[in-house]
Image: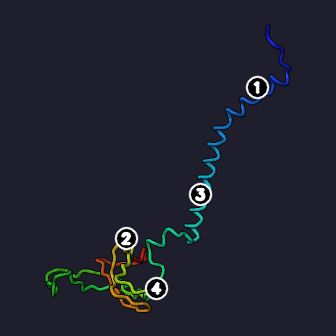
Amino acid sequence: MIPYEPDSARRQKAGFRPWIAALPALVIVTIFAANALVQIGQASRAISGSDTSKVSKSLQCVEVYGVTLTNSEYYLPEGTWSRDPQKPLELSTVVSGMVRNNCGEPLRTVTIHINVRDDDRRRGDGSVSVSGLSPGDAKPFSKAWMGRITSYEIAKIQ
């Protein structure tokens, strides 16, 4: 003989099983939502410029100022002392400026990474190092490129 169960007891047992089945899906949705919130927070910090992960990659207390682009048709490649009159003149551009140590400590070497574009919108990059900057000191820097440079960007200061 089968014992009698009221309908309410059967409904409670049957209603409990779908919640158990829905629990893993709820956990997965929660994980994806948390991941999305973290990524949105990182993106907003990067856009606003308050991203603290870039502090170690670039010196924020070093100032670069007075940057000029100077074109010259009398470029001499490194290691040569005079121009060969048979060769045509080569155009070059010198990017020069000043770097100042606004940090509270002396810096042994400061490396400035520069991205440039030429007349044909082609990109180039290079770096220049300035050594021995005491707090508050400023020193000049310069970097030469072949061709006519039309724009520059200070990419990173290390």
- What residue does disc 3 label? 38
Q: CA distance from mark 2 to mark 3?
A: 40 Å
For marks 3 and 1 on the same chain, the one whose residue lies earlier in the sequence: 1
**Element under label 1?**
helix
Mark 2 vs mark 4: give the one in front: 4
- What residue does disc 2 label? 120
Q: What residue do we see at 22% from left, 82% from top?
A: 89
For marks 2 and 4 on the same chain, the one whose residue lies earlier in the sequence: 4
- Disc sitting over residue 14 in the figure: 1
**Element under label 4?**
loop
- 6 or 145, nearer to the observer: 6
Q: What residue do we see at 84% from left, 14% from top?
A: 4
- 30 or 39, nearer to the observer: 30
Q: CA distance from mark 2 to mark 4?
A: 38 Å
Amino acid type for the residue under numbered disc 2: Asp
Q: Position of residue 149 (x, y in %)?
A: 36, 78
**Element under label 2?**
loop
Amino acid type for the residue under numbered disc 3: Val
